[in-house]
Image (cartoon, helix red, strand yellow):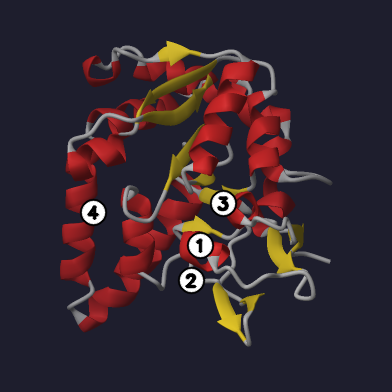
């Protein structure tokens, strides 16, 4: 089990525990303010955090403090973990409000509006009152499932996020190019900004036809072609997106943990 499961998911995956979505947990005024400020000042906060971290890391006696502070933020305030399609669908089946908004990362990076970020419960209640996200819309389970499937077919990775851990407020469906937090993950490799998922991919090499689709679509450089066969390396984050692009269906996910 991962560290979040040990802390917040007794006996099961932490993001499938209904109490981590509970209104009672979300009722904290501190958490409500954090959610509001997070979305209201998303772009400004991103620029500020990157700028301050870059400056601090140039000063030897401040560097360690800056790195520790960033790690703490992404474990205690806004923790994210890669999840597979099946788990993303299961999350959307947990009772409560499910809504979709335009991805703030995509809008910041390209100016495009893509409705692919899923919000839950109190997070959606707060965000709908922010003018920039006034076009938020609610979804039923079937619509949420179709959205998740359609983004996977586009090669996007599903990640689940907390707003002051362990309260879970969102599923992001992005790729490396279109996600600010993936940008930060690649920029600050010392930090656990996006945690690996509970599974890792495995390939039946005997049946692999060596087409390379899985290597092309992988967001984490986790696939190599050796002697005409695909192999999964230790960089695999367990998103499972490669399965959707395998024409001979020889890729499966297995548990990362004993």
Marks 2/1 in contact by CB < 8 Å: the verdict is yes
> Element type at marker 4?
helix
The residue where tag 4 is placed is 49
The residue where tag 3 is placed is 82
Name the mark nearer the viewer: 2 or 4. 2
> Element type at marker 2?
loop
Residue 25 visible to an observer of this rendering: no
Along the horizontal axis of the image, is 240 left or right of 26?
Answer: right
Name the mark nearer the viewer: 3 or 2. 2
Q: Is residue 195 above or below residue 174?
A: below
- N-terminal of the pair, mark 3 or mark 1, is 3
Residue 125 visible to an observer of this rendering: yes
Q: Badge 1, how many Cα within 10 Å: few under 14, some, many 20+? A: many
Gap between marks 3 and 2 measured at Cα? 15 Å
Name the mark nearer the viewer: 3 or 1. 1
Marks 2/4 in contact by CB < 8 Å: the verdict is no
Q: Which mark is residue 221?
A: 2
The residue where tag 1 is placed is 218
Instruction: Tell me where residue 112 appears, x and y as whole percent.
Output: 23, 34
Instruction: Tell me where residue 24 appears, x and y as whole percent.
Output: 61, 20
Gap between marks 3 and 1 measured at Cα? 13 Å
Marks 3/2 in contact by CB < 8 Å: the verdict is no
Gap between marks 4 and 3 measured at Cα? 22 Å
Name the mark nearer the viewer: 4 or 3. 3
């Amino acid at each position: 089990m991962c560290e979040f499961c040990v802390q917040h998911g007794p006996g099961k995956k932490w993001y499938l525990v209904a109490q981590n979505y509970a209104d009672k947990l979300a009722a904290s005024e501190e958490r409500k303010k954090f959610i509001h400020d997070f979305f209201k000042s998303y772009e400004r906060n991103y620029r500020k955090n990157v700028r301050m971290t870059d400056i601090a890391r140039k000063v030897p006696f401040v560097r360690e403090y800056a790195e520790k502070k960033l790690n703490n933020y992404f474990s205690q305030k806004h923790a994210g973990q890669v999840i597979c399609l099946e788990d993303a669908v299961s999350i959307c089946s947990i009772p409560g409000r499910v809504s979709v908004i335009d991805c703030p990362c995509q809008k910041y990076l390209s100016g495009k509006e893509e409705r692919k970020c899923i919000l839950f419960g109190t997070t959606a209640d707060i965000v709908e009152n922010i003018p920039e996200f006034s076009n938020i819309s609610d979804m039923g389970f079937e619509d949420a499932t179709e959205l998740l499937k359609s983004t996977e077919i586009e090669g996007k990775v599903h990640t689940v996020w907390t707003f002051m851990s362990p309260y879970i407020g969102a599923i992001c469906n992005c790729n490396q190019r279109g996600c600010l937090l993936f940008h930060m993950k690649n920029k600050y490799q010392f930090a656990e900004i996006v945690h690996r998922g509970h599974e890792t991919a495995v390939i039946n090499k005997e049946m692999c036809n060596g087409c390379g689709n899985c290597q092309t679509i992988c967001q984490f450089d986790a696939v190599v072609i050796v002697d005409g066969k695909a192999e999964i390396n230790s960089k695999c984050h367990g998103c499972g997106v490669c399965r959707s692009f395998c024409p001979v269906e020889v890729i499966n996910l297995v548990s990362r943990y004993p």
